[in-house]
Amino acid sequence: MLRSENLLLRAIEPSDLDLMHEWENNPAIWHLGRTVSPFSKYSIQEYIRHVEQDIYATRQLRFVIEQLHEPKKTIGYIDLYEFDPLHRRAGVGILIGDESERRIRYASEALRTLIPYSFNFLNLRQLFCFIPENNFPSKALFGNNGFKEAGILQDWLLVSGEWIPVIVMQLINYEREEDIEE
């Protein structure tokens, strides 16, 4: 578990089934991942039952974002994906699934909690993310937390018959001397 002032980042529990089923089956966000059809409750239940929290084995790690203040409430997920221990990098994805909790800075707090864990505990050198060019809140979220634009992937996402460019953003940890070449 990782803690911040207002949030707990924790492993997935069986009690997360209903929210996970609701959020994973929201077609409005499918274009942000690789989902092309709904998930059954059974398939999500099996995922939760067998989820491996070893990022070295699965190359991904999902944390549930839970509010610490009363009443405690699950509000979303933050993921590390495409974990590459050789090149010491991973992608970051965030979903504040509870729409009433968006734009309250919980995503930023979760990201600020995940970054030191990624750099100091997992020993990563960089984090990256892919953001649809028209997703201004996500660009601001990552930019305000130190991520820099690294490039644009043209015609990357097909959304409602329209090709959308994607911005690649990176946060590189230059603080470790062994990473800096002379």
Image (tube, rainbow, N blue to C red):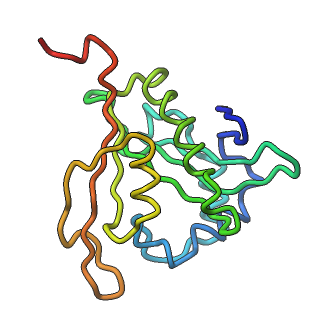
Q: Residue furthest right?
A: 70
Q: Position of residue 103 (x, y in %)?
A: 60, 61
Q: Is residue 155 above or below residue 138?
A: below
User: In this orientation, does residue 63 appear?
Assistant: yes
Q: Is residue 151 above or below residue 39?
A: above
Q: Is residue 105 above or below residue 158?
A: above
Q: Is residue 152 left or right of residue 28?
A: left
Q: Position of residue 158 (x, y in %)?
A: 29, 78
User: In this orientation, does residue 89 appear?
Assistant: no
Q: Position of residue 124 (x, y in %)?
A: 37, 27
x 34%, y 19%: residue: 175
Q: Position of residue 52 (x, y in %)?
A: 55, 40
Q: Is residue 143 left or right of residue 4?
A: left
* The C terminus sits in image quarter: top left
In-front residue for pair 46/96: 96
* The N terminus sits in image quarter: top right
In-front residue for pair 82/136: 136
x 74%, y 51%: residue: 14
Q: Residue furthest left?
A: 182
x 35%, y 60%: residue: 131
The part of the image, by quadrant, that contains residue 42 is bottom right
Q: Residue furthest bottom?
A: 161
Number of numbered discs visible in the structure rendering? 0
